[in-house]
Image: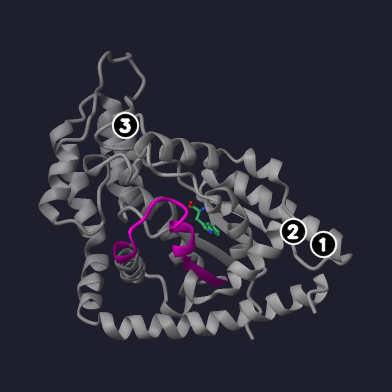
Amino acid sequence: MSEKKRILSGVQPTGNLHLGRYLGAIRNWVDLQNDYQCFYSVVNYHAITMPYKPKKLREQSWDLVYRLLACGIKEENLFIQSLVPEHTELAWILNCNTSYGELGRMTQFKDKSKQVRETDKDMFISAGLFTYPVLQAADILIYKPSLVPVGKDQEQHLELTRNIAQRFNNVVGKKYFELPEPLFTRIPKVMSTADPNRKMSASLGEKHNIDLFTDENRIVKQIKSAVTDSGEVKSDAMSPGIANLFNILWEINPEEHGQFLEDYKKGNLQYGVFKEGIAESLIDYLKPIRERFEEIQADKKQIRRRIKDSSAEIRKVAAQTLSEVKELSGLL
Ligand code: TRP
């Protein structure tokens, strides 16, 4: 089979696919497909660690599949986590090689359990939320990747994955798992256009993120209403809002970025023109993605079948690892 190094990453089927997620992660995933053997997962088992609705979860999972394919992820590299149940079996074994204490130190657990407590008094904090990072470790280790492209927010989970792998190796007395390295994306955070001091995210609400698949008028409107100067203007520092817009433009149209930056340096950047330029560039840039999405919409049934097939193919790799792990662990 392929001699290429492997990559694994996962994305939760919650929240919309917005520009921050795309520029910060998905675009990178697409590019990495040229040089690596890639395993990309819609991690729906992770999505049920927080309060959820079954029907919505199913819809969101498939919807994310369509959108990822529209972005350029190849069908054969994409799978749905719950179609590869070996992840959960490996997670159990790894759970027993993970200490309660280190899971309690995970900042994402602290943040999310706080979120559950604050948003829904009747809801409990699930045991799954607590052991979530172990399932993530299983997602990763089961494919023996060398690299895991993630955002900086996942650094602690990657560190834990390496610790778990190391511990497993010690227990079985063999360097079975390689310790995978995180691959952080090149670009700094894309910030909300409505509040450029906060990261662009789905959970902040609609006006804070630019959905890749929203209609073009809305994109224009969102860029036009982007916050530029907020409050006091410090003489020579670029305001966070302007810096964020430059950042976005750099990612989608570097040439135009250069031109506007010159205007800015000369002190004659016109915000209206600047914003129009960005909106136009963004619409051009997203055009092929949106067109592919239209095509996919017409072919959903076939696509679902093919993703089930690719998941079954990928499952073979996972099954192989799991059987080796069980053998090494004395689980018959
Ligand atoms: N925890 C990741 C997130 O919240 C999602 C994820 C689950 C993941 N399993 C993974 C990321 C494996 C990388 C590798 O974004």
**In the image, 150: left or right of 254?**
right
Mark 3 Cα-neighbour bin, 10 Å: few <14, some 14–19, many ≥20: many
Marks 3 and 1, how far apart in space? 45 Å
Q: Considering depth in this image, is 233 or 308 the residue closer to the camera?
A: 308
Residue 66 lies, with reference to residue 95, above or below; the image says below
Does the CB distance between marks 1 and 2 fall below 8 Å? Answer: yes
Which residue position holds label 3? 196
Mark 1 Cα-neighbour bin, 10 Å: few <14, some 14–19, many ≥20: some
Q: Which residue is drawn at the image coordinates 29% and 38% (left, top)?
A: 245
Which residue position holds label 1? 169
How many numbered badges does the structure rendering display?
3
The answer to whether residue 145 is seen in the rendering is no
Does the CB distance between marks 3 and 1 fall below 8 Å? Answer: no
**In the image, 77: left or right of 317?**
left
Q: Which amino acid, by three-letter code, is at mark 2?
A: Ala
Q: Nearer the viewer, mark 3 or mark 2?
A: 2
SS under mark 1: helix
Marks 1 and 2, how far apart in space? 6 Å
Q: Which residue is drawn at the image coordinates 36% and 66% (left, top)?
A: 61
- Res. 165 mark: 2
| Quarter occupied by the N terminus | bottom right
Quadrant of the image occupied by residue 196 = top left
Q: Position of residue 126 (x, y in %)?
A: 50, 49
- Looking at the image, which residue sits at the far right? 173
SS under mark 2: helix
Which segment is the magenta one?
Answer: 37-56
Q: Considering depth in this image, is 250 or 305 the residue closer to the camera?
A: 305
Q: Which amino acid, by three-letter code, is at mark 1?
A: Asn
Marks 3 and 2, how far apart in space? 39 Å
Q: Which amino acid, by three-letter code, is at mark 3?
A: Pro
